[in-house]
Amino acid sequence: MRVVLFTGKGGVGKTTTAAATAVQAARAGIKTLVMSTDAAHSLGDALGVALVTARDDPDPVVEIEPGLSALQLSPTHSVRRSWRVVQDYLLSVFKGLGIDPVVAEELTELPGADELVALLELRAQVESGPWDLVIVDCAPTAETLRLLALPEALAWHLERLIPAQRGFLRALRPAAAAATGLPLPGVQVLETLRQWHEALLEIQSILAAETTSVRLVLTPERVVIAESRRTLTSLRLFGLAVDQVVVNRVFPDAGTPDVHSVEANQRSTQAAWLAGWNEAQRRGLSEVRHSFEPLPIVVAPYLSHEPVGPDALEALARARIGEVGDVLTTAPAQGMTVRPDAGGYLLTLPLPLVTAAEVDLKRRDDELLVSVADHRRVLSLPSALRRCVVTGAVVRDATLRVRFVPDEKLWPVQGRESVAGR
Ligand SMILES: Nc1ncnc2c1ncn2[C@@H]1O[C@H](COP(=O)(O)OP(=O)(O)O)[C@@H](O)[C@H]1O
Ligand SMILES: [Mg+2]
């Protein structure tokens, strides 16, 4: 099943672009679901239908027309309910430590619960929905990035919590409880953590799948482009394939050379205003090409009206220029690679639009922590690299390259082992 996520700065036209792509695909015979994870309920507005139900009702999948269905997620409480088991345990620990209950309650809140609801629903639809294509209208960039980073981050914590707790319990249960006076987690707590961990790993594999890609929606304005450049880097940091940049709300004249003479501009302030914007957009478009090529760049016109309803959305989709292939076409995988190189290994991670100075690397046991600006990714090192040391890192051709060589101190018998292995 193909999954396409649309993200971008607030208000650039993510929902409209996602819905237009969905209508176009459905009318081309592709069985499509479009779902929104944005708490601002505008997917229904764009499609011209009511998608939101009363609180706590299960979110319904609404058929818009044959082949096209839509789903608006409302923050339900099922995720919080499931977390409650873990939270109650943590609260009892904090109580034993004499921490203020109000503070404890806040400390034990599940981070990103609403985002998790969205990811869990995406997983459910990918696993059991009848769709060929799932289009996800995401919340604005910052929230989306947090959402995309969440499975890896949470899974990382849970991975460390679960085995430690198991061993701890087996060895120390009666003694530890007596010694510390703190309650130990029960079977239900551990079982909940295990289920969470499993769900997160599945979500991660959906996001990393070759059939999943992200499309970046932006408008040809400098502030928006600057944010989108950072977003592209962060998306790649999290291993997501970006397969298209959609420039939305482009004035009809911005794509062509300036046709207004200076004299004509002076004749009316309105014309001058328009010419000013055309010129700004023209510069914006060239900055977009400069920043994002060779990614396909699709240009969508600024319509004279808000595109509402399937017909208007399809018309917008048809008016776009620069589309390559159809929506089912998948982008080539662009993940982390490791290959032998000059007696050691070379790890590469595509990271467009960054300089070496912006990247920070840290080694922590079996992991490599890669930070760009305020986003951090935890890369689990393949076993071949675990006994190696990092000898250098560079950013070249939009790719981070990290060199590893076997650590003689850690592995003094290496030579002998390779002989013995023959
Ligand atoms: N190409 C376009 N031409 C005209 N109006 C547009 C276009 N794209 C979006 N809009 C309008 O702009 C507003 C914001 O779009 P929306 O898709 O809700 O943005 P986002 O989801 O990024 O917040 C909506 O009123 C929408 O109808
Ligand atoms: Mg929106």
Image (spheres, grey):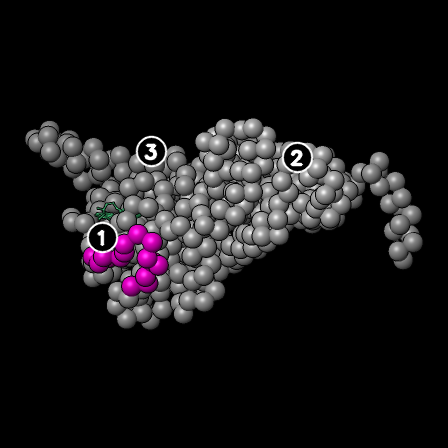
Which amino acid type corresponds to the residue marked 2 in the rendered image?
Gly
Tag on residue 181?
2
Residue under pointer 1: 45
What residue range appears in magenta? 47-62
Q: Secondary structure at mark 2?
A: loop
Look at the numbered discs 2 and 1 and tell me whether their residues touch, using CB distance below 8 Å: no
Going by the image, does 271 lie left or right of 360? left
The quarter of the picture where the C terminus appears is bottom right
Q: Quadrant of residue 250?
A: top left
Residue 291 visible, this angle: no
Looking at the image, which residue is at 45% across and 50% down? 81
User: Is residue 84 placed above or below 50 in the rendered structure?
Assistant: above
Which amino acid type corresponds to the residue marked 1 in the rendered image?
Asp
Badge 2: few (under 14), some or many (20 or more) residues near its Cα, within 10 Å?
few
Residue under pointer 3: 222
Going by the image, does 276 lie left or right of 93? left
Q: Nearer the viewer, mark 1 or mark 3?
A: 1
CA distance for labels 3 and 2: 58 Å
At which x and y percent is residue 40?
29, 45
Main SS, magenta region, reads: loop
Beta carbon of the mark 1 residue lies under 8 A of ligand 1: yes
